[in-house]
Image (cartoon, rainbow, N blue to C red):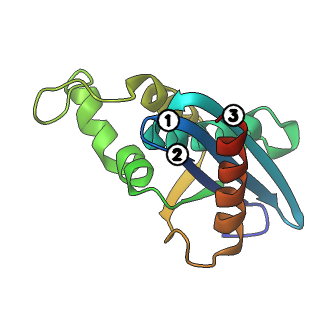
Amino acid sequence: MDSQDLIVYTDGGCSGNPGPGGWGCVIIDGNDARQLSGGEHVTTNNRMELTAAIMALTAIKNTERFSGRPVSVYSDSQYVKNGITGWINGWKRNGWKTASKKPVLNQDLWQKLDSLATSMQVSWNWVKGHAGIQYNEICDQLCQEEIAKHR
């Protein structure tokens, strides 16, 4: 990783599953850290985790000064990290069906994330949630604030 790399932290969650949900992300460019967040009245944890990553990559794609720069995404969601780095290849091969021949949940979001990720140079990393990692904690706080707004 060098000074040109953009660092992204993401988090999403719900109060109840499904229930009111929120997502948060932080895009770090050197000393600049941009926070984004949003939520929905009825959603799931996994949808909010995916939405956080989608919104972060969309913001990067739509920011001219970020164009063409490598992105390192840090998520505390094994679902997002394992899905985008591994499972998605089989899902696409199998016509968006799981190994057990069932439709992939959240296919709409997976397709958006895949489209964004394949148009950029993205590395995916897992971090332990609620472990005192500064930007992961900020994302969690943004997420909790959004959940409160959508109750």
- Residue 143 at x, y percent in the picture: 66, 50
- Residue 106, relative to residue 137: is it above or below? above
Residue 136 shown left or right of residue 138 in the figure: left
- Residue 140 at x, y percent in the picture: 64, 59
Quadrant assignment for the C terminus: top right
Farthest bottom residue in view: 132
Residue 7 shown left or right of residue 62 in the figure: left
- Residue 16, relative to residue 108: is it above or below? below
Give the residue at x 69% y 44%. 148
Give the residue at x 41% y 44%. 84
- Residue 79, relative to residue 102: is it above or below? below
Can residue 8 be seen here? The reply is: no
Tell me, yes or no, whether the two marked residues, 2 and 1, touch with CB atoms within 8 Å. yes
Secondary structure beneath label 3: helix
Secondary structure beneath label 1: strand
Q: Give the residue number, with chain letter if any, for mark 2.
A: 15
Q: Distance between the residues labelled 1 and 3?
A: 25 Å
Residue 131 shown left or right of residue 97 in the figure: right
Q: Give the residue number, with chain letter if any, for mark 3.
A: 58
Give the residue at x 83% y 37%. 63
In the image, 146 versus 70, the foreground residue is: 146
